[in-house]
Image (tube, rainbow, N blue to C red):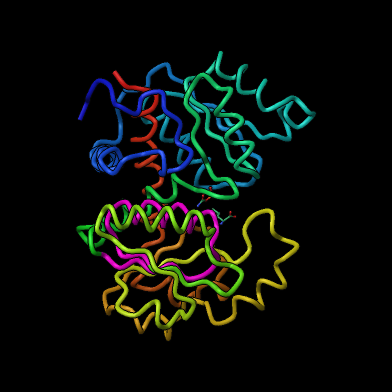
Amino acid sequence: MYSTNSSMQGKHILTWLDYSQSEVCQLLAQAQYIKENPYNQSLKGKNLAMIFEKSSTRTRVSFEVGMGHMGGHALYLNTKDIQVGRGETIADTARVLSGYVDAIMFRTTSNERLTELAEHATVPVINGLCDIYHPCQALADVFTILELKGQLCGIKLVYIGDGNNVAHSLMILAAMMGMEVVVSAPEGYEPDEEITAKSKALAEEYNGSVTIEPDPVQAVKDADVVYTDVWTSMGQEEEAEQRLKDFQGYQVNKELLSHAKPDASFLHCLPAHREEEVTAEIIDGPQSAVFQQAENRMHVQKAILQAIIGWR
Ligand code: CP
Ligand code: NVA
């Protein structure tokens, strides 16, 4: 599909709440085409700035390599090295970078900093993970589920663990795709109430469902897909010891997975901590699709870049 313009041209990708189901379906279809036809010159001469305030393997490499596949270029900017680290404002950084590049990807500690950048940038901004959302991850997740199960509508997706940035974006997007979403988190670690309410409203609109079920065994019953993420996210390291205690019983292991459908798939956004949120037996076992999922980050992000930068 070598098309002209998209309705998403110039738009920021901050959360999927700003997008329609049909726009997401367009991105998924384009990602599938790109996966089969990885190389083109659609973004020749285009530049992506990637600002990182936190560590990254997948996001950094998949965006950088993806731009290269399409004839474009990506710049890795660590906030420790650029002037933001010495107090230059996010607003000025946004204005300056907009004069050089065609899009900005930002991995940041707070959603406020992300929205501030987006407000002052005149080029599209992509959320490469913030404290509340991880939209690029969620797009790769639903793309992977579509590959694994052949459909999204009616598929039961169970997220076990921390109601964090990954859980939020996944809930929103899976609900928008008509999936049956169940989130199982210990008390005090449930997903944000407002995001849960918005996901439920989306599920209602698209014939899906969103349920919060504290009992992981009950939650995982007849699941098609079981998903987890780390118990301690980046920036929460001081809480790690307490979290390790609080998340006992929420590990994805053979016993828990035995309550899911026999052909259930296991997903994890990675990086993973084996024997904490998931056993090595499961993540390295036959039901795991985590490396297919990680690879898919690149394919879906290439579709995002084409859509928001605009391709020729
Ligand atoms: N899943 C994910 O975003 O990985 P990185 O932190 O390595 O980018
Ligand atoms: N929830 C994790 C995701 C890492 C990709 C974090 O924010 O650290």
Give the percent coordinates (x, y) of residue 308. Answer: 38, 27
Q: Is residue 161 above or below residue 307?
A: below
Q: Residue at x 25, y 20 (%)?
A: 4
Q: Is residue 266 above or below residue 91?
A: below
Residue at the right extreme of this rendering:
86
Where the C terminus falls, by quadrant?
A: top left
Q: Residue at x 44, y 75 (%)?
A: 213
Q: Is residue 199 left or right of residue 99?
A: left
Q: Is residue 83 magenta?
A: no
Counting every numbered tag in the picture gives 0
Q: Is residue 93 above or below residue 135?
A: above
Q: Is residue 56 left or right of residue 158?
A: right
Split into quadrants, the picture shows ligand 2 in the one at: bottom right
Q: In which quarter of the view is residue 304 placed?
A: top left
| Segment tinted magenta in the rendering | 155-181
Give the percent coordinates (x, y) of residue 135. Answer: 45, 46
Where the N terminus falls, by quadrant?
A: top left
Give the percent coordinates (x, y) of residue 75. Answer: 56, 27
Q: Is residue 308 above or below residue 275?
A: above
Q: Residue at x 45, y 41 (%)?
A: 62
* Nearer to us in this view, 59 or 201: 201
Give the percent coordinates (x, y) of residue 145. Answer: 30, 58
